[in-house]
Image: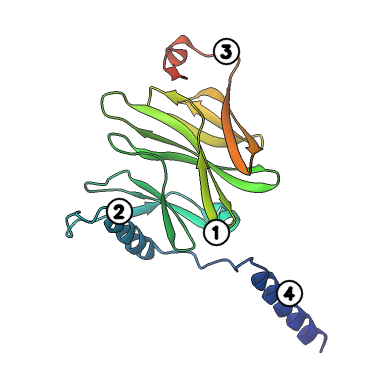
C-alpha cells in the first residue's frame, strides 16, 4: 500500500511539473532520427538543393549535454555539407557556428550561469583566412539563445574543455584563457579572459575589433 501511494504521488508530481510548462525530457535521438530532421532543415532553408544530396551525421555531444539541455549536437561527416554542425532540441534544428572552408564545431564544454546549464563550444571556418571562434548556446523558455564574443583566432586548433570547474580554451597544449559569462537583459554575454602570458606565435593570431 505504501509503495502504491508513493508511486501515485510521483505520477501526480510529474503531471504537475509538465502542466506547469516544464515538459518531460524527450527521448534521445538516434543518428537516423537526427539525419531525417537535419535533412528537412537543410531543404527547408535551401529548397534548390540537389534532392540526391546526403548528410551523414556523427554525434559530438554525450549523455551530460542531453541530460542537462535535452539537446544533442551533430556534425555532417561527408559530402558537400561536410563539417556543418547542428544542435537539435525537442525536434527543432539549429545551426551552430559557421563551417564553410573549415571544420565546423571543434569542441564542447558544459558550464553554468546562475545555476543554469550553458553549452560553450568552438568552431572553425574560413576560406583564405582560416579562423576559430568561441560561442555559447543556452536553452531558455524552450528557445535557443546563441552568442559569441568579438574574438577570433587565426588558427583552426582552438578547443574548449572543462578544467577545475571552468571552461578553458586551449590552442594545442597552450592555455589561451577561460570562458566568462554574464547575463544582461535576459541574454548571455560571453567573453574570453586571456591568460596573463602567451607565446608570441599565438598572440599574433588573436583578433579583436
Outermost residue, bottom direction? 1
100 sits left or right of 53 in the view: right
Q: Find disc 4 in the rendering and name its residue.
A: 13
The Cα atoms of the two marked residues, 2 and 3, are separated by 44 Å
Look at discs 2 and 3 and give the one toward the viewer: 2
Look at discs 3 and 4 and give the one toward the viewer: 4
In the image, 202 versus 16, the foreground residue is: 16
54 sits left or right of 209 in the view: left
Outermost residue, right direction? 2
Specify whether residue 194 is in view.
yes
Q: Of callouts 1 and 3, which one flags the residue occurring earlier in the amino acid sequence?
A: 1
Residue 70 marker? 1
Secondary element under disc 1, as helix, strand or loop, is: loop
The Cα atoms of the two marked residues, 2 and 1, are separated by 24 Å
Q: Find disc 3 in the rendering and name its residue.
A: 197
To which quarter of the image does residue 131 belong? top left
Secondary element under disc 3, as helix, strand or loop, is: loop
Amino acid at each position: 500500500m505504501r509503495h502504491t501511494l508513493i508511486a501515485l504521488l510521483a505520477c501526480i508530481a510529474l503531471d504537475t511539473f509538465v502542466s506547469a510548462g516544464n515538459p518531460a525530457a524527450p527521448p534521445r535521438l538516434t543518428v537516423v532520427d537526427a539525419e531525417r530532421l537535419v535533412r528537412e532543415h537543410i531543404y527547408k532553408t535551401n529548397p534548390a538543393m540537389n534532392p540526391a544530396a546526403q548528410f551523414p551525421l556523427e554525434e559530438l555531444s554525450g549523455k551530460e549535454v542531453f541530460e542537462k539541455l535535452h539537446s544533442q549536437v551533430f556534425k555532417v561527416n561527408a559530402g558537400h555539407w561536410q563539417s556543418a554542425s547542428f544542435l537539435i532540441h525537442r525536434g527543432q534544428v539549429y545551426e551552430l557556428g559557421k563551417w564553410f572552408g573549415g571544420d565546423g564545431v571543434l569542441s564542447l564544454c558544459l558550464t553554468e550561469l546562475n545555476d543554469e546549464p550553458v553549452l560553450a563550444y568552438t568552431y572553425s571556418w574560413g576560406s583564405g583566412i582560416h579562423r576559430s571562434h568561441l560561442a555559447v548556446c543556452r536553452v531558455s523558455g524552450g528557445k535557443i539563445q546563441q552568442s559569441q564574443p568579438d574574438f577570433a583566432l587565426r588558427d583552426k586548433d582552438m578547443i574548449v574543455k572543462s578544467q577545475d570547474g571552468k571552461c578553458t580554451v586551449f590552442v594545442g597544449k597552450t592555455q589561451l584563457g577561460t570562458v566568462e559569462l554574464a547575463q544582461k537583459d535576459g541574454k548571455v554575454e560571453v567573453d574570453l579572459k586571456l591568460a596573463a602570458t602567451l607565446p608570441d606565435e599565438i598572440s599574433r593570431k588573436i583578433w579583436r575589433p
